[in-house]
Image (cartoon, helix red, strand yellow):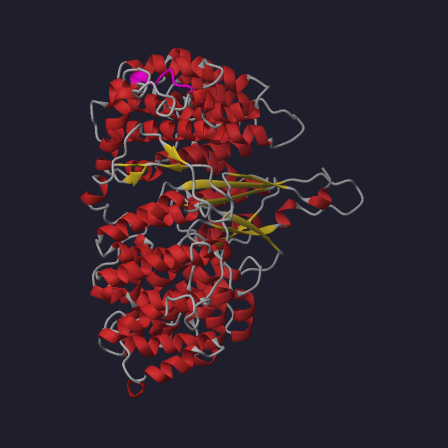
Amino acid sequence: MKRATWPLVALLLASSSAYAGGTPSVDSARVAAPLLATHDHDGRGVARRLLNGTDSDQRLAGVARLARLPGERGKEALLELLAPTAPGANDPRVALAVVRALAPWAGEVDVGKGLMAYVERRANALNDDPNYANVLFGTALRLARKTNDIEVQRRLLALHSTGSPLLRTVIELAFSDAPPSPAVFGHGTPEGGLWTFEPPPAENTDLRGGRRDATPAPVGGLPVPTLIALARSGDLRAVETLYARLIGRKSEGVAPKKPETTGTKASKPETPEKTPEKTKKLEAVLEHEALAAVLDALADADDGRALPLAKAQLTSDDGNVVAAAVRVLVRLGAKERFSAVEQIIASENFGRLGLQLAPAAPTAKTVAATIARRDAPADPEERELARAALAKIDAPKAAESLAKHALDLRDPASRIDTPGLDDALALGRNPSAVVDERIGELAKKNDALAFVAYASAALTRGTTPEGFAAFLEAGATSKDPARRQRAAFAAVALLGGSGTRLSTSEDVPTRAGALAALGRTERGRTAAISGFSNEKRERALRAMSVFPDAPLAAEAWASRAERDELAALGTALRTGTRFQKVHLSSGLARATLPAATGLLARAALDETDVVVRRALVRALAARPETTAPVRTEALATLAATDPDREVRAVAAAADQGAPIPDAPHGLRRLVVLRITGEGDGSATKMPLSQFRALWVDGRGRARPISFDDDGFAFAVTDDDGDGTLLLAPATESP
């Protein structure tokens, strides 16, 4: 591998995208007061002139003017703005402002139907800007759902069965707070089987313009795919509806009964041989999906009916159904769970499924089969699945297998081997009592891999593994700079040290390791920000750069904002990357400038990226101007209309002066990054420790990381989302 290309290998790393977009101003979405327009002298004429303007901000001002006027006619005027020929109809910012402004009437039938019709008419807009459409349609559908009108609910659920995957997800979120009304389950039960299909009408097309081959007939008043989605969400009425139709067909392993015929050619049902192949495949897919959904739902409810249904499906030819059946047996503690896992892990068709389920029902046979799959060279994907299974199986043989592969370096001349790294990470996560001993043996051969295994074990257990402290103490005084850097990182990030002494060490590797660890703590960020340049121009330029200290610069710039910087900060909040927006929000939360509250409020209403919007609303909640109208209105709007549950919860708590709920976190995870390269002699070799990067976690928080001389960089994240690595130019960091 030529050094000039510097390929990167990232473990436990996935990509997350940053969005940018714009939406309405704060004043465009008042929900604290009734909305209306009457005559020109009340402001309706001015509003119309603004709405007919060419500038988006002018049109938003027109919506805001209507939103401030009291009376019933205001509602009607706002509903008119949802029409396809209305001023600003093609401006998604105006559309979202109108939808939000209708929030006070969300419980009224005419508003619910108007919002529903708008979504039905503009469904194709999802193809134009899915990020924005997610917020726009999510808001509209959530408000429409508040009507509790049966017609609206049925239209909403019908749209679920025909819409794009994104639209279906948005609709499911609209029902997340309140399930459908009982009336939608007992209407229009068709004759015939559950999996009946009808030819589509000529105008029936999907959201991307393609023709649909068949439309599932409704069951219990709802389309089959919608029932499946509701069953997966835990709606027991959907589960019962599906179960009632499935029990006679599959639960006892009995083939479905053939419908009675009159013996006439005209009334004779079409034979399976004459059924279009696409339709038969679609019927089978839906039936399998329904079975899997019912199995999982019954098991979640500890319903004993799940056991006979699961046992009957162990011989299914569908992997999802078999998986659901085995999960039921494991979840309900059935004695058959061990033999079921042994059977599928040895099968040719379901071997990979067996590897995924092996930790739930470990036996000597499943452990041996898993180790055999890990040792087999033929299928890399199966080896990965087997490694992941061995990391979870509490058996000495599982840990020993991982240790063997970690020690068996493919290139004895290399200090680090990527396959060995995978097994070292898995070894640290294994719950067996022999893990610490195996890691100690690994340390005698490869210090870096042992460090990874120890760190993985510490994060998995939440305690210090036996031998880890001594291992780090030796590394801190080692002549190897890479070992010193790793030891400093672990002392702060994994063992809870303050890092004050290490972060100011004259030893460059020690200082680099400590600073990389401090980047994840509030204390560390505050200390770094306080020492950042006082030059406004330098802070602004650094904040919007790709340098490793950009997150710190963004917080420093925003926290020290002056009035003449508000316009630039507003632009940065609209156009920056995800991590830039998140760190600007964090800085503005602490800014002494009162106008920072208005800046955060407008940005929170404008933002389409839910990760950034969560950061903005938390920053807005932290502002001291608790009675400022701009803050109150923005929080009320987000609490009433935002499609994201976390944003609504934080906004509602802040608006009511209640404690702000903590952000949901997953398990702390070790992120291991490695940069490799083998120079071809054509250029001067650059030390790997000269490389810098930014690690951005799933909540948009970024921290600088440094590679050591072995090409390793580490980060610890406490969210369960994906992360992004951004390679950055080397620079001195404060």
- Magenta segment: 311-317
Main secondary-structure element of the magenta-colored stretch:
loop
* Residue 139 image-quadrant placement: bottom left
* Residue 295 image-quadrant placement: top left
Residue 178: percent from left, percent from top: 23, 48
Q: Is residue 338 magenta?
A: no
* Residue 365 image-quadrant placement: top left
571 displayed left or right of 237: right
For image coordinates 36% across by 68% down, the residue present is 97
Q: Looking at the picture, does residue 428 appear above or below residue 200?
A: above
- Looking at the picture, tell me which residue is in the foreground, 582 or 687: 582
For image coordinates 40% across by 53% down, the residue present is 521
Residue 248: percent from left, percent from top: 26, 20
Q: Looking at the picture, does residue 381 appear above or below residue 72?
A: above
Q: Residue furthest right?
A: 682
Residue 197: percent from left, percent from top: 38, 33
Q: Quarter holding the N terminus?
A: top right
647 displayed left or right of 349: left
Q: Looking at the picture, does residue 364 appear above or below residue 216?
A: above
- Looking at the picture, tell me which residue is in the foreground, 325 or 186: 186
Residue 189: percent from left, percent from top: 25, 35
For image coordinates 26% across by 69% down, the residue present is 31
